[in-house]
Structures are given as C-alpha cells and as structure tokens.
Image (cartoon, helix red, strand yellow):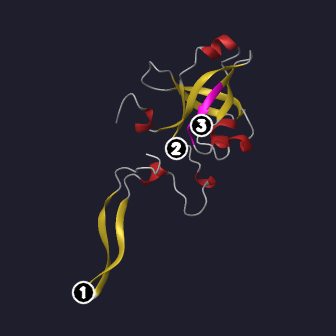
Amino acid sequence: IDPYDPTTYGYVELGTIIGAHGVHGFLKLSSTTDFSEKRLCEPGIRHIKPPNRRSPREVQLAEGRPLRPDSATTGSDANPIYLIRLEHIQDRESALKLRGCVLYSLEDEKVDDLLDEGEYIVSDLIGLNVFLDEQVYGDAKKDLFVGNIRGVVMGSE
C-alpha cells in the first residue's frame, strides 16, 4: 500500500481536473476511467485529492456531461474531457483552485452491471488463482495450479 496513491487502498481514479469552464463553477476534467458516463455524469458522492494531500476527501458531484459528443472522441487515444460541477463550487475562482486535483470513486461502487459477458475489470483479476484446465496425469484428470495473478501488463504499456 502506497499512502500517496489512493488506488492502492480502495479508490478508483476517475480523472484529473485540468481547469475551469465558464463563470458558474464548472470544472474541466480529463477522464481516465472506463464507464465515464456512469461515473462522471450521474450525481452522487465522489472523492477529490489535491496534489499536496495524502488522502481524498468526500465531495458531492452535482452534475456532469461530456464536453463534446461521444462521436467526436470515439476511436481517439486522448482522454475525453468532461464538464462536472461539484456542490460546493459556485464560481470560477473556486473552480480554478481545484486545478490538478484528482477525482476518485470508491472501489465498492462497482459497475459490473455495465460489463458484457466475458468482460472483466482488470483490478478484479489481481489476486486470482490461475489453473491449466484438465491436465492428464496418468489416469486422473485434474486442474494444474500455475500461480496467482500479481499484476496485469496492458497491451499499450
């Protein structure tokens, strides 16, 4: 567990605040999460961590929407930009103070119902046992234990 990395103790990173938008306290956020529509557009409790703090604090997401329509960002490697508004941020000056902060949700707030059959969230695979199916040893068939998943290397890394 890294005390400066909330993803190691129960949080999922949603994105980084990159600036203010307008004069009513909207924030521009560069999304780093899958299921952005669910996690960034639905009101509810989220957590925000300023760069100089160790732990995130609870905030209320009032609203959110993509800066551009999905069709403009589909197929691009860039992180989509979202406009979000937090309950306690009412003006541009307050919004500008949050630049560089990272927005999180709790790991317990799962999005499993949005996954197709055979799809998994990478972090859920960590710690699982790996077996080779039905290896034949003499006359008996049994699964061969290979090990535990300690990390996943993504194709883009």
Q: Which of the two discs, 3 and 2, labels the residue nearer the N terminus?
A: 3
**38 part of magenta stretch:** no
- Residue 32 magenta-highlighted: yes
Amino acid type at mark 2: Asp
Q: To which quarter of the image does residue 72 belong? A: top right
- Residue 138 got which mark? 1
Q: Which amino acid does label 1 sit on?
A: Gly
Q: Residue 113, labelled with which disc? A: none
User: Where residue 91 sits: x, y (%)?
Assistant: 70, 13
Q: Residue at x 74, y 17 (%)?
A: 24
Q: Which of marks 1 and 3 is nearer the N terminus?
A: 3
**SS for dot 3:** loop
Residue behind mark 2: 108
The residues bearing labels 1 and 2 have C-alpha atoms spaced at a distance of 45 Å
Looking at marks 1 and 2 on the same chain, the residue that comes earlier in the sequence is marked by: 2
Q: Which of 101 and 156 is in front in this view?
A: 156
Q: Overall secondary structure of the magenta stretch?
A: strand
Span highlighted in magenta in the image = 28-33
Residues at marks 1 and 3 touching, judged by CB atoms closer than 8 Å = no
Q: Residue 79 carries which label?
A: 3
x then y, percent, for residue 61: 65, 29
Q: Local crowd at mark 1 within 10 Å, few (<14), some, or many (≥20)? A: few
